[in-house]
Every structure is written in C-alpha cells, then in structure tokens.
Amino acid sequence: MSVTSVDKNFDDLSLTLTADFSAPVERVWRLWADPRQLERWWGPPTYPATVEEHDLTPGGKVTYHMTGPDGEKHRGWWEIVSVNPPTALEFVDGFSDADGAPSTDMPTTHGSVEISAHGDGTRMVVRSTFRSREHMEQLMEMGMDEGMEGAMGQIDALLAV
Amino acid sequence: MVVDEEAADRLFHALADTTRRDILRRSIEGEPSVSRLAELYPMSFAAVQKHVAVLERAGLVTKTRHGREQRVRTDPDGVRRARQALDHLEALWRGRVDRMVDLLAEPAGTSGPDEPKETDR
C-alpha cells in the first residue's frame, strides 16, 4: 500500500510517483472526482483546501483556496486538459490572485494521473511536471508560503523510516 | 511567458542529446577541458565545442579559462535547485498519498450524503 516508486527526471523537471491502494478503481477515482474528498487530501493539514468550482470536463475548471494557520487564503486553480473517468485526468495547476482570477504571470505545473486495477487493488500513477525552469524557481520561492513545509515535516518522519 | 518557454526549450534541447548528457555528467564529477572531452567522443573538437555551447546557453554548465585550455564545469546551483524542487514536489505528493490512504480507510458514507452505492469487486 501507498507509494511504491518515485522517479525524478532532471531532464524534463518531472516527478512520477506510483502508489498502490487496496481499494477499487472507482473508489480511488472518487478522491479526485468528488470535491469533498479532494479538499481533504490536496492541501497539507496546516493549509486545508476548500474546493469551490469543480468541473472535470475538458477545458473545465477546478478552483480552490487553502487557508493558512493565520487565516490567510491562497487561491489556486486547475484547468482540465483531458479526462477519462474513472481512469485518467490531465490538468494544468496554477495560482490565482486574491479575487480568484487566474494569474498569468504565476508559475504552473502540469499534472496527470492514471488509475488502473492492479492485483486486488488499484495503482495510481501521478506525474507532475514543472512547466519551465523559471516556473520551478518561482515555485520554490513561493513554496514556503504555500505550506509545503507543513507537508515536509510529516514526510521527513516518513522518509526516516 | 514567452521568455519562460524559450528557456525551457533551451533546457530540454540541451538535455535531449546523449553526448551532451554525458558531458554534463563528466563535468559534475570533474572539470574536464574541451580538448579532453573531444578525445572521448568520435567527433571533431568543433562539434564538441558546439555541444558545450548548447549546455552553456541552457544554463547547465559554465566555461572557465585556465591558461590555454577551457574547462567545463556544471553550474552546481542550477542542478541543485532542480534537485531541491523535485524533492519538494515528492514530499508534497507523498503527503497527499498519505492523506488519500487515510481517506480510503474511512468507512463508506462519511464523505457526503450522496455517496454512490459501491460494490467492492
């Protein structure tokens, strides 16, 4: 169960992560397709997410905000590139300004997920790609604000095992 | 945005070639001169110089002059930043997968009133 492999590609600045779950494909898909489920895993515990718009159709938008420890809100969006329920989703992941309008000068990443039956359970392959080196640098600088640190703390404990 | 695209193109182009990736690896380990690199590959000095120039434009290596020879060195900052960024991304996704596992372990019906009926296999 959980993460079974991680591949980092320094050539195209992408991360491919494979996770195996002991749940059926439809159930794993619902983690993405049900906004109430999505908001429970997308943000780190210190920056819980609230999903507003959630339209998983090509060209559709998912909009959300994450609320930080001091009540400050960080807004983000996905733009759906392609979707094939319950097995595939591809989207661009970006940030919005305070009014919720997508910021065109903010960095984006490209995400794709593939979900398939695997043994008695389900395999999920997530691929996340920095759009460019500049976007990567910008995200690194914003990372602290966006609560990556919160996730990092938890993960350090995991990695130490 | 256009500038970003161009920088990304340069980076991907730089890394899309076996010889250039090999040059990059060797200049991480040491600081080979262009003439030393030219001895390693079945190609002309000028061809190797061109490969180094592509890597240089992508911000992956720098060239420094030592007497009569030019040495190629990996830009350690660029490589380190990429590693850091991908490490962050990994941590982020590991955290998410962790939370997914917790959610999947919850009994059906806790996530909302319109829970679809599920038949497990």
Image: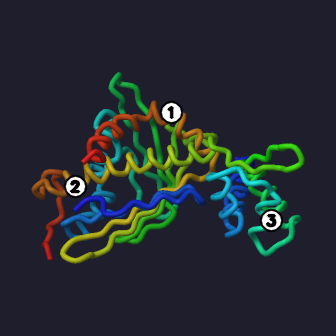
Q: Position of residue B82 (x, y in %)?
A: 56, 48
User: What is the spatial separation of the Cα atoms under label 3 and label 2, in whole angstroms?
Assistant: 52 Å
Q: Chain letter for mark 2, please.
A: B
In the figure, residue A45 lies in which quadrant?
Answer: top left
Front one among A61 and B4: B4
User: What residue appears at the point 67 percent right and 62 percent down from the top-left corner?
Assistant: B15
Three-letter residue code for mark 2 = Val
Percent coordinates x, y for residue B33 in the rendering: 78, 54
Find the distance from the CA under tag 1 to the CA under tag 2.
33 Å
Tell me the residue at 34%/42% (across/down): A43
Residue neighbourhood size for the residue with mark 2, other residues' Cα within 10 Å, grouped as few (<14), some (14–19), many (≥20): many
- The chain to which mark 1 is attached is A
The vertical placement of B72 against B115, above or below, is above
The first of marks 3 and 2 along the sequence is 3
Q: Which residue is mark 1?
A: A99
Q: Residue furthest front?
A: B67
Is residue A45 toward the left or the right of residue A83 in the image? left
**A132 left or right of A122?**
right
Separation of residues labelled 1 and 3 (CA atoms): 56 Å
Q: Amino acid at mark 1?
A: Asp
Dot 1 surroundings within 10 Å: few (below 14), some, or many (20 or more)? few
> Considering the numbered disc 1 on the image, is that residue within a helix, a strand or a loop?
loop
Q: Position of residue B91 (x, y in %)?
A: 38, 46
Q: Find disc 3 in the rendering and name its residue.
A: B38
Depth order, front residue of B14/B43: B43
Res B118 quadrant in image: bottom left
Observer able to see residue B105: yes
Residue B20: give x, y in percent of width and height.
Answer: 71, 63
On residue B101, which mark appears? Answer: 2
> How many marks are shown on the rendered structure?
3
Residue furthest toward the top? A70
Q: Which residue is at 21% across, 71% downward?
A: A121
